[in-house]
Image (cartoon, rainbow, N blue to C red):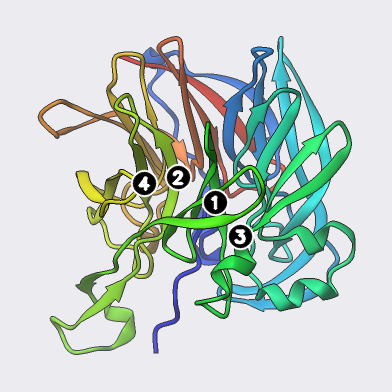
Amino acid sequence: MISRARMGPAIGAALLVTLLTPAVASAHQRVTTIATGLDNPRGMTFGPDGALYVAEAGKGGAGPCFSGPEGNVCFGPSGAITKISHGRQTRVATGLPSLAGPDGTQAFGPADVATVGGALIFPSGNVIPPAARGGLPGSGKNAGWLLWAAGRNVFPLADISGYTAQTLPDGGNPNSVTLTPRGAVVTDSAGNSLLRVAPNGTISTLATFPSQMVDAPPSLGLPPGTQIPSEAVPTSAIVGPDGAFYVSQLTGFPFPASKASVFRVVPGKQPTVVATGFTNVIDLAFDRRGSLYVLEVSHKGLLSGDLTGALIKVKRDGTHQVVNSGLTGPAGLLIKDNAAYVSDCGVCPATGTVKRIPLP
């Protein structure tokens, strides 16, 4: 039996060997690195102070350890939020929950970040059943929650993993957060859903995303032509120029190439596909002209063993323009002042970066 995919930004350890030889971006694009030494950097936001805040999923720790879908993961309070301002980077929230493999890869921890006032709002990814969190020390009990931090204090807002466990015993994996006047909107990559968290902490489902049938990989030994279900695995949600939510799709195992889409979600209506033909999408952004950009964590597909990612512009006719293919397992995207900010090596402990890429 093929197990249910629990893929947020994490990927199989076998694929991570490609991180030793990251691709190099074209020189003419004047790509600059504005932060280094990050632990599995993921989603980002610009704060009202103009600083860039980056969620770091951490690198796990000494344990307790659990059997995860891709091998053992061990807990450690190594998750963080880093602030980048005037050429300096500082971890402004630390001690956050992180579950990762023994080598610090396959990390589930702070997956995105938003700001309101002086507070940081962020989802903490999770890969263990909600009931197992009780055995974790300290911040480990917050794995799978939407959290907020003010200064050095962290407070729970909503138990995303526990909410999903009402229908899926393994619980949920919150992967992104977007703030709206009606509360926070969160993608749950394990629950294949888009959720709303009201200001009082109440959780409701805005949309669910369907699986699709795809060709079985040869490694399963099934007869040629056999098809198997691949889950949607939504990874990020942003508000578009029209006020609707736009949701990216990673796709679950076997992570088929060119089968990922971008959905448009209007609460109360079924999701619709507005762009397609992508591979393993991890994040989205619109530029000031309303053009959509898509970030692929792996341009050739996660089973290819090649973690070369791509930043893609969706043209008005729906065709794709590759803006940058010099990325390695990227995991977060923002656009500001005609430049893309990408958290690169988003599956790397200690060597993740943030890159600034001028847009055409």
Disc 2 or 4, which lies upstream in sequence?
2
Disc 2 versus disc 3: nearer the observer: 3
State the CA–CA distance, disc 1 to disc 2.
7 Å
Disc 1 or 2, which lies upstream in sequence?
1
State the CA–CA distance, disc 2 to disc 4.
5 Å
SS at circle 3: helix
Disc 3 or 4, which lies upstream in sequence?
3
Residue 236, image x and y in percent? 45, 45
Residue type at the position of mark 4 = Ser
Residue under pointer 4: 248
Asked if labels 1 and 3 touch by Cβ distance under 8 angstroms, the answer is no
Q: Residue 235 versus residue 350: which sits nearer the camera?
A: 235
Disc 3 versus disc 4: nearer the observer: 3
Disc 4 or 1, which lies upstream in sequence?
1
Disc 3 or 1, which lies upstream in sequence?
3
Q: Quadrant of the C terminus?
A: top left
Residue under pointer 2: 236
Give the left or right position of residue 288, taking residue 218 as reference.
right
Asked if labels 2 and 1 touch by Cβ distance under 8 angstroms, the answer is yes
Residue under pointer 3: 160
State the CA–CA distance, disc 2 to disc 3.
15 Å
Disc 2 or 3, which lies upstream in sequence?
3
Residue 213, image x and y in percent? 21, 72
Residue under pointer 1: 175
Residue drawn at point x = 48 percent, y = 27 percent: 334
SS at circle 2: strand
Residue 73, image x and y in percent? 70, 70
Q: Quadrant of the N terminus?
A: bottom left
Residue type at the position of mark 3 = Ile
Circle 2 packing at 10 Å, graded few (<14), some (14-19), many (20+), is many
